Amino acid sequence: MAELTLFYDGNCPLCVNEINHLKRLDRAQRIVFENIHAEDFTKRYPDVDREEASALLLGDVHGQRIRGLDVTHRAWSLVGRGWLTAPLRWPLIRPIADRVYLWFAPRRYRISGWLTGRQRCQSCETGQCDISKKP
């Protein structure tokens, strides 16, 4: 059974790059990755507000909702790389990191354009980035 359901923005190239990286590292399949733009998303997850999930990274840990950098740290910890994100949760850094994340989240498409040359994914018919099924 998965330890985290991670709801991600499948239209964001930066988000999809991170998800693909996590998927490769998640050999034990401890994370379930759910694209909030999937056709059947609202049918399968009626309790998840797609608008909130688009504005802020959401995760579910055994029925408890976690948000933002808490999701990031949980995911990277589950794949054995939590030491990379742990400083973001340290008491003195956490409030600053959370503010930076709240600034970044609504600007992720523009930032993605600067970093990748693409603001939104358009690699398939649905306009969503390809998430490989293979670990």
Image: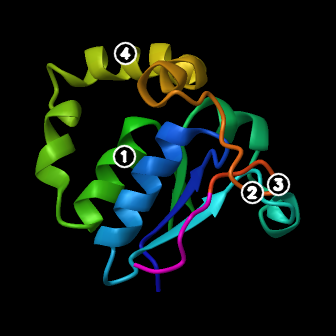
Discs 4/2, front: 2
Would you say 114 lies left or right of 78 here? Answer: right
Mark 4 vs mark 1: which is more N-terminal?
1
Density class for disc 2 (Cα within 10 Å; few <14, some 14-19, many ≥20) is few
Discs 3/2, front: 2
Count numbered badges in the picture: 4
Q: Is residue 40 magenta?
A: no
Q: Quadrant of the C terminus?
A: bottom left
Q: Position of residue 21 (x, y in %)?
A: 35, 59
Foreground residue, 73 or 126?
Answer: 126
Q: Position of residue 120 (x, y in %)?
A: 66, 34
Gap in angstroms between the C-alphas marked 3 and 2: 5 Å
Asked whether the beta carbons under mark 3 and mark 2 sit within 8 Å of each other, the answer is yes
Which residue is drawn at the image coordinates 78% and 59% (left, top)? 38
Which residue is drawn at the image coordinates 74% and 57% (left, top)? 124
Residue highlighted by disc 4: 100
Q: Amino acid at mark 1?
A: Thr
Which residues, given as a range, are shown in magenta? 130-135
Q: Tell me the colour scheme of the image.
A: rainbow
Mark 3 vs mark 4: which is more N-terminal?
4
Residue highlighted by disc 1: 72
Gap in angstroms between the C-alphas marked 4 and 1: 14 Å
The disc at residue 124 is: 2
Question: The residue tagged with tag 3: helix, strand or loop?
Answer: loop
Gap in angstroms between the C-alphas marked 3 and 4: 31 Å
Q: Position of residue 94 (x, y in %)?
A: 25, 25
Residue highlighted by disc 3: 126
Q: Amino acid at mark 2?
A: Cys
Q: Position of residue 22 (x, y in %)?
A: 36, 61
Question: The residue tagged with tag 1: helix, strand or loop?
Answer: helix
Which residue is drawn at the image coordinates 86% and 66% (left, top)? 40
Which residue is drawn at the image coordinates 37% and 15% (left, top)? 100
